[in-house]
Image (cartoon, rainbow, N blue to C red):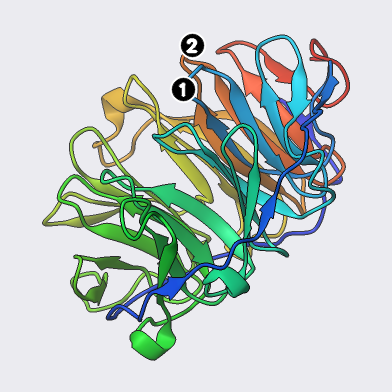
Amino acid sequence: MMIYTHLFAFFVLVFCTSCVEQKKTDLPKDTINYTIKDTVTSYGPNRMVRNVKQDRNGNILFAASRGGVFRYDGKSFTNIASKIGPRRYWDVLEDRRGNLWFATSDSGVYHYNGKIFTHFTIRQGLVNNRIGKIYEDKAGTIWFGTGGGISRFDPSRAGGKSFRNFTMKDGLSNNDINTIMEDKTGKIWFGTRGEACFYNGKTFTVFRNKDGKAFNNVWSIIEDKKGSIWLGSNDGLWRYDGRTITKVSNRGASAMIEDQKGNIWTTGAVNPNGVGTWKLLRYDQKSLYNEKPTVTEIMSIEGPGMLCGILEANDGSIWFGALGSISGVFRYDGKTITDFRRKVDQK
C-alpha cells in the first residue's frame, strides 16, 4: 500500500435516462491538417489524468487535462495531441478502425486518423462541447457522454458524417453523463448525475431496485464474466445478476474494471460526500459473490482528492490516474507502484 497526501479538490462528471432519437445533423467540415511533430519525453504527464486506455499495439494511452493525450510504448511518452494546444482532455479511445478520439471538457471532440485531426463541436452536430466519456459499442457506433445529453456517431451511416442526439427533451432524466457501457444483450447503460438507466434501442428505462428506488450519481458501470452488472457511486458498490440487486460495499466506487482473473478493481472515496481519503481496492474473485468478499487495499491518498480511471494492461499490470499534488499516472505490477510523473522508474 502507498499513502499520498494533500490531493487536489474533488470534481466529477456524470450523465443519462429515458427517450427517442432526434433528427440527425450533417457535419460541416472542420479539419486540422498539418504535419504532426509529437513531443516525446522519458516521463509521463504531471497533470491530472482522468482516463487510461490501451491501443491495439499494446501502448498505454492517457488523457491528461491541460497536459495533452499521451501514448506510452514501454520506453517513452509521446504527447500525440501536442499540436492541438492546451485543452481539458478528459477521455481517449482507439476505435476498431484504428482512429483515435480525444474528448475534452471545454472544446468538443478531436478525431485523429494518424495524419489529420478533425474537430467536432456543436457546429458539427454534438449536443454539447463538454465531453466526459467516449464509448464504442459492439457494432462500432461511438457514444459521447456530454454535459448536455448523449451524442451517438455511426461511422457506417451517411459516410460517418452525422450525429444523433438524446437530451432531457426526449425523456432523459439528466443530461450530465459520466459513464457508458453495453451489456451482452445489447442494452446500453448510462451513469448520470441523476438516475442511472439503460437503452434498448428504442426507449430508455430508469434502473431501480425492488423498492422502486433509482441509483443516483453512478460513476462506473461494468459487466463481469458471469453477466452481472456492477454499479459504483459515492454511496457504494452494487451487483445485479439479472434478478437480485446486492449491495457489495458501502465504500464509494468511482472508476471500476474486472481483470483477467475476475477480480474487481475500484477507485473511490471512503466518505459518501467524496471528500477525504480515496482508495484503490481489489475485490477478490474467489470470494466475490460471498456476503463479505475479501478486499485488498492497494493504494490510499488523503483527500480531498481523487484517483481516476483504471486499466488492466495486456501484461496484467494495473494502471490508474490521479489528480492534485500527485497528479499523473501510476502502474501497479502486483508488488510495486511506479510513479511515472518525473522519471520512468520513480517508485
Q: Which residue is mark 2?
A: 315
Q: Position of residue 153 (x, y in %)?
A: 41, 59
In which quarter of the view is residue 280 placed? top right
Q: Can see residue 238?
A: no
Q: Secondary structure at mark 1?
A: loop
Q: Using the image as rendered, state which of residue 115 and residue 179 is in the foreground.
A: 115
Say which amino acid is labelled 2.
Asp
76 to 269, vertically: above or below: above
Q: Secondary structure at mark 2?
A: loop
Q: Position of residue 344 (x, y in %)?
A: 80, 13
Residue at 70% across, 62% down: 11
The label shown at residue 241 is none
Q: Using the image as rendered, state which of residue 138 and residue 309 is in the foreground.
A: 138
Q: Earlier in the sequence, mark 1 or mark 2?
A: 1
Residue at 56% across, 30% down: 297
In this rendering, the label closer to the viewer, 1 or 2: 1
Disc 2 residue crowd, few under 14, some 14–19, many 20+, Cα 10 Å:
few
Count of numbered tags: 2
Q: Can see residue 173?
A: yes
Q: Position of residue 32 (x, y in %)?
A: 72, 49
